[in-house]
C-alpha cells in the first residue's frame, strides 16, 4: 500500500518562484488600486482610451512629421514601424502564449474603470508594448522628440494598472517587448547615427562668425523662405540673395564674385548650379537643403540651419568628388547622379503635367505612360556590346543599401562612378523592380553593376534624354563620364548633434 502524500507541503524550484512572483504582482496591483493618485483621475483613463488601436501614436507621428524636418519625419516613421512590429508580435505570439486572466476589479474605484473592459488575455499589455515601441523607435532616431514622447508613453503604460485592466508585470513585459521591437527595426533599417558617413578628407575652410563673408543664393521656387529667415537669425552677418529659378545662374556668378564662401539653399538642381560657380571661382560651398530632393545635403549630414550654421562658425569642411559628363552638345557636372533611359523620360513627362494636375499625380501618370510605352528609351554600346537598355545610372560615389533602407553614399570622395544598368526586354516595370530588389548584387538577369573611374557611351540617337541631379538635357552620339577627385570643398558638420 502506498504511503500517504502530504499535499500541503510547499513546492520548491521554478514553480515556487513563479508563485511568489505572481503573489507579489497581485499585492502591487492591490497597492496601486488603494493608492490615491492626485490629478490622475481626469487624465489617465482618457489617455488609456486614446491609445486604443494605436490612434494616439498615429496622431503623435503626424504631429512630429508636421515639423517638416528630415530627422522628425524619420523619427515618426521609425516609431510607427516599431509599433507595427510590436503589435504583430503581441497579437500573434504574446496573447496566445500566456492565457492569464485580467485582474479582478473589486479593489479599483469605479471612477477609474474603463467604460468598456478588454476581453483579451492580460499578459502582456498591448498598450504598454505599443507605447514603448513608439517612444523607443522615435528616440533611436531623434533624442529630442524621444524625450517629448517618453512621458506620454510612460503615462499610457501606467494607466493600464491605474484603470485595473493589467497587473504590473503585464505592463513591464509589454514595455520590454515594445522596446525590443524598436531595436529589431533598427537592426533592419539602421538609423542615420549608425550609418554616418566618414568625414573625409578634411579641408581647411575659414570659420565665419555670424556668417560674415557668406553670400547665400536661394531659389525662390523651392519654398525656401522659412529656411532663409532661419539662416538670417542664426547667421545675422550673412548676405542672403533670393531669386527666381531663371535668374539663379547669373545670381550665383555675381555672388561668387564678392563672397568669401558661396552658399546655396534649394534642391539638388539648385545646388548643382551653385557648385558650378564655386568650382569656377575656387570657393568653398555651403549647402542648405531647401528643395524637393536634397540628397547631396543629406549625405553631407546637413539637414537644417543648425547643422550648417555650426559648421560655418567652427570652420568644418571636407573635399568631395565631382562627376563630369561631356558630349557634342557641351558638358556638365553632377554631385549626385547621372542617368539615361527611363528616368529622364519620366522626369520630362512629369514636367509636362505637373502644372496642370500637381507634382505627385504627374509623377504617377508619367510612370504609367513611360513604362507602358512599346519601345526602349535607350540603345547604347556598353562594355563592348550594343544593347537595348531601360536605364543606365551612374552615381557620383558608391551607393550602399543598409538593411532594407534605400541606398545612400557613405563616402563622397571614393573616386569611383557607381554604374548600374537595367537590361532591355519585356515588362520594364518588373525588370526595374527586380533590379531594385537585387540591391548591392553586381549581376542579376535584370541588371548589372560596375564601379569605374570613367565611362564611355557611344551610338546614342539624336534627342536622347540625359538627367543629372534632377535636371534634363538632350545628347547624341558619344557621352563620356569621368570623376574629378576631391574637386569641390564643402562645409560639413564634423561633430554629431
Image: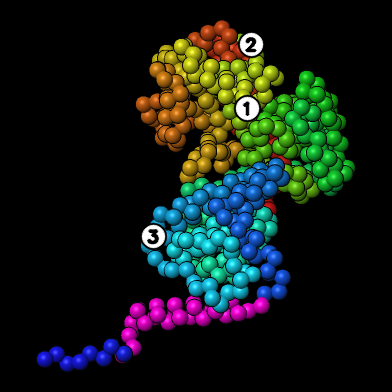
Q: Nearer the viewer, residue 207 or 36?
A: 36
Which one is closest to the eye, mark 2 or mark 1?
A: 1
> Which comes before the other along the chain, label 1 or label 3?
3
Q: Residue furthest right?
A: 237
Task: From the image, tell me which residue sits under label 3.
Answer: 96
On the rendered image, what quadrant is the N terminus found in?
Answer: bottom left
Position of residue 148 relative to residue 188, above or below, is below
Q: Give me the residue at 32% from left, 85% from top.
A: 11
Which one is closest to the eye, mark 2 or mark 3?
A: 3
| Structural distance between the alpha carbons of marks 2 and 1 | 32 Å
Residue 360, label in figure: 1
Look at the image and give the residue range highlighted in magenta.
9-36
Residue 20, label in figure: none
Q: Give me the residue at 58% from left, 9% from top.
A: 463
Answer whether residue 11 is magenta in the image.
yes
Where is residue 386? Give x, y as percent. 42, 13
Amino acid at each position: 500500500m502506498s504511503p500517504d502524500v502530504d499535499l500541503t507541503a510547499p513546492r520548491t524550484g521554478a514553480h515556487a518562484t513563479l508563485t511568489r512572483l505572481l503573489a507579489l504582482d497581485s499585492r502591487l496591483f492591490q497597492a496601486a488600486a488603494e493608492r490615491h493618485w492626485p490629478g490622475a483621475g481626469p487624465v489617465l483613463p482618457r489617455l488609456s482610451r486614446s491609445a486604443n488601436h494605436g490612434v494616439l501614436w498615429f496622431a503623435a507621428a503626424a504631429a512630429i512629421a508636421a515639423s517638416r524636418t528630415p530627422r522628425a519625419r524619420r523619427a515618426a516613421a521609425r516609431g510607427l514601424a516599431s509599433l507595427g512590429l510590436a503589435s504583430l508580435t503581441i497579437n500573434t505570439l504574446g496573447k496566445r502564449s500566456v492565457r492569464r486572466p485580467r485582474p479582478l476589479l473589486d479593489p479599483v474605484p469605479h471612477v477609474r474603470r474603463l467604460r468598456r473592459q478588454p476581453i483579451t488575455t492580460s499578459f502582456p499589455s498591448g498598450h504598454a508594448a505599443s507605447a514603448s515601441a513608439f517612444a523607443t523607435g522615435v528616440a533611436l532616431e531623434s533624442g529630442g522628440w524621444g524625450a517629448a514622447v517618453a512621458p506620454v508613453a510612460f503615462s499610457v503604460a501606467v494607466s493600464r494598472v491605474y484603470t485595473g485592466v493589467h497587473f504590473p508585470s503585464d505592463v513591464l513585459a509589454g514595455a520590454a517587448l515594445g522596446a525590443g521591437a524598436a531595436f529589431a527595426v533598427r537592426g533592419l533599417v539602421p538609423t542615420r547615427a549608425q550609418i554616418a558617413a566618414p568625414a573625409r578628407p578634411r579641408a581647411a575652410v575659414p570659420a565665419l562668425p555670424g556668417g560674415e563673408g557668406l553670400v547665400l543664393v536661394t531659389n525662390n521656387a523651392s519654398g525656401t523662405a522659412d529656411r532663409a529667415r532661419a539662416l538670417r537669425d542664426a547667421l545675422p552677418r550673412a548676405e542672403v540673395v533670393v531669386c527666381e529659378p531663371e535668374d539663379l545662374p547669373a545670381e550665383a556668378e555675381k555672388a561668387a564674385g564678392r563672397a568669401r564662401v558661396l552658399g546655396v539653399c534649394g534642391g539638388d538642381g539648385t545646388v548643382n548650379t551653385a557648385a558650378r560657380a564655386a568650382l569656377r571661382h575656387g570657393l568653398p560651398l555651403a549647402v542648405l537643403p531647401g528643395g524637393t530632393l536634397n540628397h547631396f545635403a543629406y549625405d553631407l549630414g546637413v539637414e537644417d540651419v543648425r547643422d550648417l550654421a555650426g559648421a560655418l562658425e567652427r570652420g568644418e569642411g571636407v573635399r568631395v568628388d565631382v562627376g563630369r559628363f561631356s558630349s557634342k552638345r557641351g558638358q556638365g557636372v553632377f554631385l549626385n547622379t547621372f542617368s539615361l533611359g527611363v528616368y529622364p523620360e519620366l522626369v520630362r513627362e512629369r514636367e509636362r503635367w505637373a502644372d496642370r494636375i500637381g507634382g505627385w499625380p504627374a509623377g504617377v501618370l508619367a510612370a504609367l505612360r513611360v513604362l507602358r510605352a512599346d519601345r526602349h528609351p535607350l540603345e547604347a554600346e556598353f562594355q563592348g556590346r550594343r544593347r537595348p537598355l531601360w536605364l543606365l545610372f551612374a552615381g557620383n560615389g558608391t551607393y550602399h543599401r543598409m538593411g532594407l533602407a534605400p541606398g545612400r553614399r557613405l563616402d563622397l570622395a571614393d573616386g569611383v562612378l557607381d554604374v548600374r544598368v537595367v537590361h532591355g526586354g519585356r515588362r520594364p516595370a518588373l525588370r526595374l523592380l527586380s533590379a531594385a530588389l537585387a540591391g548591392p548584387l553586381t549581376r542579376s538577369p535584370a541588371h548589372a553593376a560596375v564601379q569605374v573611374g570613367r565611362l564611355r557611351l557611344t551610338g546614342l540617337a539624336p534627342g536622347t534624354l540625359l538627367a543629372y541631379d534632377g535636371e534634363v538635357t538632350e545628347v547624341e552620339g558619344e557621352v563620356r563620364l569621368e570623376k574629378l577627385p576631391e574637386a569641390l570643398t564643402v562645409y560639413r558638420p564634423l561633430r554629431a548633434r
